[in-house]
Amino acid sequence: MRARKSILLTVAAMMFAFASFAQLFQGPLGKANKQYELHAYNLAIQSYKEALDRRPNDEEALSKLADCYRHLNQMEEAAKYYVRAMAQKGVKTETKLEYAHVLKAIGQYDEARRWYLEYAKDQPEEGTHYAQSCNFAKGQTNVPSQFMVVSEFVNSSASDFGPTFLGDGQVIFSSARTDIQRTSSNWTGKANNQLFIASVGRDNHLESPYFLKSDTKNTFNEGPVSYTRDGRWVAYTQNNFVDGTRHIASSGMNLSIQIAELSSTGDWINPTAFQYNGSDFSVGFPCFSADGKALYFSSNRIDGFGGYDLYVSYRIGAGNNWSAPQNLGSVVNSPGNEVTPYVDGENLYFASDWHEGLGGYDVFRAELVNNRWARIFHMGNGVNSPRDDYGFIYDSFRNRGFLVSNRPGGRGNEDLYSVYKSGDNVVIKVKNAADGSPLANATVDFSACGEGAFIADSKGEYTFQAMRGLECNLLIRKDGYISKSILLSTVGVQQQREYQVMLSRVGEEYAGRVVSYTTRLPLDDVTVIATNQTTSTEMTQKSNLSGDYMLALNPNTIYIVRYSRQGYRDINRTVRTGGTFDRDVLGVISMIPVDAVITDDQTARDPLVNTNDPSVNIPRGYAIQVAALGTPNLSGFDDLKNLGDLYYKEENRKYKIRVGVFSTRADAERVLSLVKNQGYKGSFIVEEEGGQTGGTLTPKTPVTKPSQPTTASGRYKIQLAAYSNVRNFDDSKISGLGTIEEKKRGNLTIKYLAAYTTIEEARQVLREAKAAGFKDAYIVEDIDGDLKKVK
């Protein structure tokens, strides 16, 4: 009996000891599993390690501990425990897939492929797909990236995510940071994510962030957000993200969308739940279309292709009502998860953990074809990494974007990265044309390119990353200066593109003209380079079709001016500006063709020399006759001297004022149109038979028109017309024919051309006046102050 009792006591003690041991082990493992189910991965890690202290080879504890590290983006630690789990019997199929994901995340693509194929033995379609994605990832390793990706200075040691543009120069993002704290007494310092705003600096990086909302209006766990461009609406995600835990579907994301109106001060008012939120699924990551009429978002609704899919709803009317969500289709959506849509009008950017990528979430671009998202493209290994890359936004015009990534080398958990296409770095340098000094704060206007205006820095520089293939006109302007338009083009070979824009101060531009020495015709496309001998700065201009060019010159300064054109001899000259503005300082330059034979040594040495020899022989050819006078007076025709040799020739006791001589009639016809543009409407071509002239003259005194009617000497005048309203009188038609006079007669103002000493001269002018449109004009003779009509 005593022996039996002893046996029973021994058995009871053993059972108690075993129960105590089981309870001791099940305690930390059960606790760990409960924490794991609640996605409290940091807490679960400690509990699983306690369980492994008791049973080091427990497959469940090893696998779930590894998965905790996977959800916390600690991939190297995860891999260590997955290796131990794979060595145990009864490892689950799902654990093989998770291990393969981790191997891919740390760039071990061959080993990842092996475990994907192991997983394919139970799940052939999914496993084979992921195995092929490893081949894709290996193929991307040495492919040059189209984008540069740089970590942002504003990143913290916490999670920074969800960037969105606000206007042209600000970015809003969410952060769980605690290094920036509120001043209100209700701030606990708890690391819930909040919204911050930061300006984009001149270097395209974000400047110091600050809270989007005031202390009295702050809320937590909001983001990402999206604003309509008209500034009327904002859509935002209410999230349950935990700092340090990856934003992936298996982490237990619980998301909903709210839509609010914006007040005139930018406050969010009247927030309303998006009508297609669900109680048993998540809806988040909203993005308005450019016109605000469509809302793109991600949801794990049961009607999708897999986990999270991308959908779109359309605004009904002008309020906050939306159509039933439409799935974006199987080209974009997959059996995996698609999140963070961003639409710029032509492209849809999104992140996916299924489409072939480098690991984790990768960013893709979808193209719209016939109103359907027809093709997707991987964004390459600059934007993407083996870790999670998502939340991509991009301004293609400014070549400025931002990205969220938990790739190695970051400052915290999720970090923000600035993104720009490694295309053309464009630098606009605005300078004073007179001395080459920078023009601070000049305006660079992109209106013609469909964008706004921007201000250059204190050095007169504005730098931006331009998309390749851009071609449009920029307007550069600054108060007190003459605006200038330049063609901005990034078509062609990628390179650093620098545009130097020289603006001339109003009133400082000097005009010059370039003509051919042999034909006297204007020369276009002549490169004129003026070098300031004091500052050594240069300005470059091109002559236009009329041979004209403009230079902004400083007073009391010496310049070396060089003229170059293909087929002509270069000219270098010294120009000295005085203390007063002299518009004739540049004058007219005659350029000699390289094949011209010049017999006059002096002229060959200095094409600027003019001939005033009264016995010059007139060659045969064609000339433009502009007037016939009774006296050899060329002083009123200075505005024609740039079009050819200005001379007079006596015929039948009349002095014919002509421009020429041109070797062909075609050349003469070209000049004739220029002469008429100068106001000599009655001019015509004559065939010059040669002979001697009374002189070729290039007077220095400019032509000036009297501001008030004057009385000229001479007995004959041309009565042009009588006007009840003198505004109807157009003197441009008869410029150069004589002095304009007027007399009052009742309510009429009579206009005359005066004055001519001979009747022959008056008759010539009369013919030209009628040819200019004064059909009723006639000659009058001044007889003792009375004007009598000449019959």
Image (cartoon, rainbow, N blue to C red):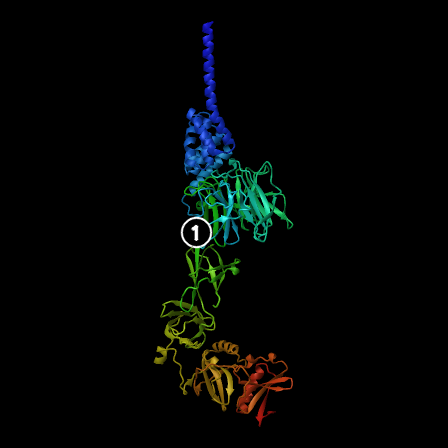
Name the residue tied to disc 1.
422
Q: Nearer the viewer, residue 566 or 677?
A: 677
Instruction: Give the image location of residue 140, x and y in percent.
Output: 43, 43
Q: Is residue 713 left or right of residue 55?
A: right
Looking at the image, the residue that sits furthest to the bottom is 784
The residue sitting at 40% across, 65% down in the picture is: 437
Looking at the image, the residue that sits furthest to the front is 185
Q: Nearer the viewer, residue 524 or 42?
A: 42
Q: Amino acid at mark 1?
A: Ser
36 up-or-down from 460: above or below = above
Q: Is residue 741 visible?
A: yes
Query: Helix, strand or loop at disc 1?
Result: loop
- Tally the marks: 1
770 up-or-down from 591: above or below = below
Q: Nearer the viewer, residue 518 or 147?
A: 147
45 up-or-down from 607: above or below = above
Dividing the picture into quarters, in which one does residue 436 lie? bottom left
Q: Is residue 297 left or right of residue 616?
A: right
Query: Dividing the image into 4 quarters, which one contains the C terminus?
Result: bottom right
Looking at the image, the residue that sits furthest to the top is 1
Q: Nearer the viewer, residue 418 or 212?
A: 212
Q: Is residue 528 left or right of residue 293?
A: left
Instruction: Give the image location of residue 205, x and y in percent.
Output: 45, 51
Instruction: Give the image location of residue 497, x and y in percent.
Output: 42, 58
Q: Is residue 117 visible?
A: no
Dividing the picture into quarters, in which one does residue 641 lie? bottom left
Instruction: Give the image location of residue 417, x and y in percent.
Output: 45, 47
Q: Residues within 10 Å of mark 1 (few under 14, many from 20)?
A: some
